Amino acid sequence: MKKEGRDRFFLAFDISDNRRRSRLVKILEKFGCRSQFSVFEFWLTPARKREFFACMEEGEFLGKREGEGILIIPIHPGSIQDISRYGTTSRIYEDPIIAVF
């Protein structure tokens, strides 16, 4: 699968409200891969990235809300090889996997 033209980033969140957190996780699972309980990793084409942020905006997750935090950390192409992983985490991918059912 072609890797060029994709943006890679991590998103970490801290949301205490169970319903909002569940709604957020559904969006994150649609577009990314869970690395830790509240950390997801994304590798999106520009079109998928626009779709992702539209879903985040629609769900009202991009504004400021008391007691909540979302942190988006871009991973630049030159620093991907510098990422170190320790311990057991959820599925991490180098190349995105597409399953057709």
Image (spheres, rainbow, N blue to C red):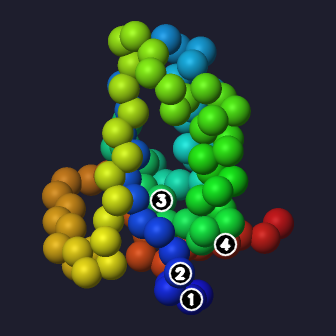
* Residue 82, quarter of the rendered image: bottom left
Checking the image for residue 2, the label placed there is 1
- Residue 5, can we see it? yes
Residue type indicated by callout 4: Ile
Q: Is residue 27 left or right of residue 95?
A: right
Foreground disc of the pair 2, 4: 2
Residue 42 tag number: 3
Q: Residue 98, which numbered label?
A: 4
Labels 2, 3: front one: 2
Indicate which disc, 2 or 4, sits on the residue closer to the N terminus: 2
Does the residue at mark 3 contact the one at mark 1 (Cβ under 8 Å)? no
Of mark 2 and mark 3, the one earlier in the sequence is 2
Question: Which quadrant of the view contains residue 50?
Answer: bottom right
Marks 4 and 1 close (CB-CB < 8 Å): no
Q: Are marks 2 and 1 in contact (CB under 8 Å)?
A: yes
Q: Nearer the observer, disc 4 or disc 3?
A: 3
Q: How far apart are marks 4 and 1 (CA)?
A: 13 Å
Give above or below for 84 relative to 67. Answer: below
Q: Which residue is disc 2 drawn over?
A: 5
Please tell me which residue lies in front, 38 or 71: 71
Q: Which residue is drawn at 49% across and 11% down?
A: 17
Alpha carbon of mark 4 to alpha carbon of mark 3: how far? 14 Å
Which secondary structure lies at badge 4?
loop
Going from N to C along the chain, the mark reached first, 4 or 1, is 1
Q: Position of residue 1 (x, y in %)?
A: 58, 87
